[in-house]
């Protein structure tokens, strides 16, 4: 690279410098926030797949840009292929590195083609992050990366429940998973994932990697909904990922800031932790992961969500329950008795073949979850 810029793979000794760079370069999208991964920046990606890498661009030894990739088998139009998720797309602010992010992405995609054999790459971008969108999707030079928008989604943070709005009589048995449920649950999650785009293939190795290797996670995290015949109709898995990934909020839009203050004032009675803003605090958040619902039935999801939220409240350790829902998703109807805030995002993908055009069937719902890389 020119202008004194050096492009290289990150190594373990870069850990502290990367953490400092991520701390200084937050994301702007109507709110200012960032992910805190201390003490080990690489732990999150290692938890998801052994096939991961991080690349740096440095100038005079200082990091000015970073990009990570996690490669794993996933379902693409119902078939299995290797897909690459681009993450940690950051560049330092300032005119001196304008457009650098896009150049880095091109170099990274070339390495993915050569070393990982991935057939498709995808990334998620905050809808209001204009710098990120223009860096990835636009070019004054007339050459585009080839990313196409697959679907919009929102990161949903549930902060409360309206007691006077109910779904009616519960139709499903909701309970925590036991070790004896593990294989049946794995088969259900994998079968549901096959009908989604970009969802991981939940073979036995991937399943064991998650339930035994993730911090603060195991089979007992799963809530299972069974119908009257005893069949699994849906599942979710609340996960405290704070050991390897935390959200730090530096600033909030006015409406959300008012909600934060109201929740903090009510914490005297609810005995839930307060939500702080600033560099020295992180969001006391519980991620609702592995959302798999048969026929995307909002009633099943509503019952699972209600139990998950009540269980979260009883711990008195968390202020929010966070997950992803896609635009026009039937599962949105499950939130009609919930108080929540949302952050709009978009999912983009591209083929890594010669034509470099998106190849996915956009009629299928994605199986991507931002907390799961």
Image (tube, rainbow, N blue to C red):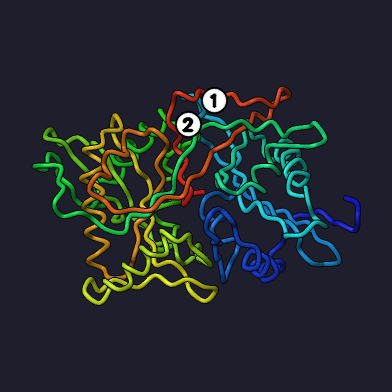
Residue position for label 2: 197
Q: Is residue 326 above or below residue 274?
A: above
Q: Residue at x 35, y 43 (%)?
A: 291
Q: Where, by quadrant of the figure, is residue 302 drawn?
A: top left
Q: Residues within 10 Å of mark 2 (few under 14, many from 20)?
A: many
Q: CA distance from mark 1 to mark 2?
A: 8 Å
Q: Quadrant of residue 56 in the image?
A: bottom right
Residue at horizontal 46 percent and vertical 50 percent from the top:
343
Q: Position of residue 60 (x, y in %)?
A: 86, 66
Q: Is residue 272 above or below residue 130?
A: below
Tags 1 and 2 touching, CB below 8 Å: yes
In this view, the residue farthest toward the front is: 254
Q: Position of residue 244 (x, y in %)?
A: 50, 64
Q: Position of residue 81 (x, y in %)?
A: 56, 30
Answer with mark 1 or mark 2, whichever residue precedes in sequence: 2
Q: Is residue 205 visible?
A: no
Secondary element at image label 1: loop
Residue 46, quarter of the rendered image: bottom right
| Residue positioned most to the right | 3
Residue in view at x 69 percent, y 27 percent: 356
Report the front residue among 160 and 292: 160
Mark 1 nearby-residue class (10 Å; few <14, some 14–19, many ≥20): some
- Describe residue 50's horizontal placement relative to residue 253 as left or right: right
Give whichever of 47, 28 is nearer the camera.
28
Residue 363 vs 285, above or below: the answer is above
Which residue is more in the foreground, 227 or 300? Answer: 300
Would residue 346 be seen by someone viewing this image from the given angle?
Answer: yes
Q: Which residue is mark 1?
A: 360
């Amino acid at each position: 690279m020119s202008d004194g810029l050096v492009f290289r793979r990150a190594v373990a000794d870069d850990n502290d410098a990367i953490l400092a760079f991520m701390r200084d370069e937050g994301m702007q999208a109507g709110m200012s926030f960032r992910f805190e991964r201390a003490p080990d920046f690489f732990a999150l990606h290692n938890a998801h797949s052994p096939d991961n890498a991080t690349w740096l661009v440095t100038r005079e030894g200082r990091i000015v840009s970073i990009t990570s990739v996690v490669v794993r088998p996933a379902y693409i139009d119902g078939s299995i292929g290797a897909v690459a998720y681009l993450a940690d797309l950051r560049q330092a602010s300032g005119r001196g590195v304008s457009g650098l992010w896009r150049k880095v992405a091109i170099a990274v995609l070339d390495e993915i083609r050569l070393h990982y054999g991935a057939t498709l790459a995808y990334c998620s971008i905050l809808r209001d992050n204009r710098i990120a969108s223009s860096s990835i999707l636009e070019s004054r030079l007339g050459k585009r990366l080839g990313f196409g928008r697959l679907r919009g989604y929102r990161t949903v943070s549930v902060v409360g429940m309206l007691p006077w709005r109910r779904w009616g009589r519960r139709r499903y048995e909701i309970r925590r998973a036991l070790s004896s449920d593990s294989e049946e649950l794995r088969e259900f999650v994998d079968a549901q994932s096959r009908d989604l785009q970009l969802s991981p293939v939940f073979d036995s190795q991937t399943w064991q990697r998650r339930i035994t290797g993730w911090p603060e996670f195991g089979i007992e995290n799963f809530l299972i909904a069974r119908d009257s015949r005893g069949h699994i109709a849906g599942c979710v898995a609340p996960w405290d990922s704070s050991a390897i990934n935390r959200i730090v909020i530096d600033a909030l839009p006015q409406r959300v800031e008012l909600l934060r203050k109201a929740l903090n004032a009510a914490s005297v009675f609810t005995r839930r932790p307060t939500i702080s803003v600033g560099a020295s605090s992180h969001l006391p958040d519980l991620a609702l992961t592995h959302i798999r619902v048969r026929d995307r039935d909002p009633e099943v999801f509503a019952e699972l969500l209600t139990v998950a939220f009540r269980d979260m409240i009883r711990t008195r350790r968390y202020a929010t329950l966070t997950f992803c829902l896609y635009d026009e998703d039937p599962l949105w109807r499950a939130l009609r008795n919930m108080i929540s805030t949302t952050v709009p995002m978009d999912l983009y993908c591209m083929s890594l073949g010669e034509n470099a055009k998106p190849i996915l069937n956009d009629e299928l719902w994605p199986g991507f979850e931002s907390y799961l890389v």
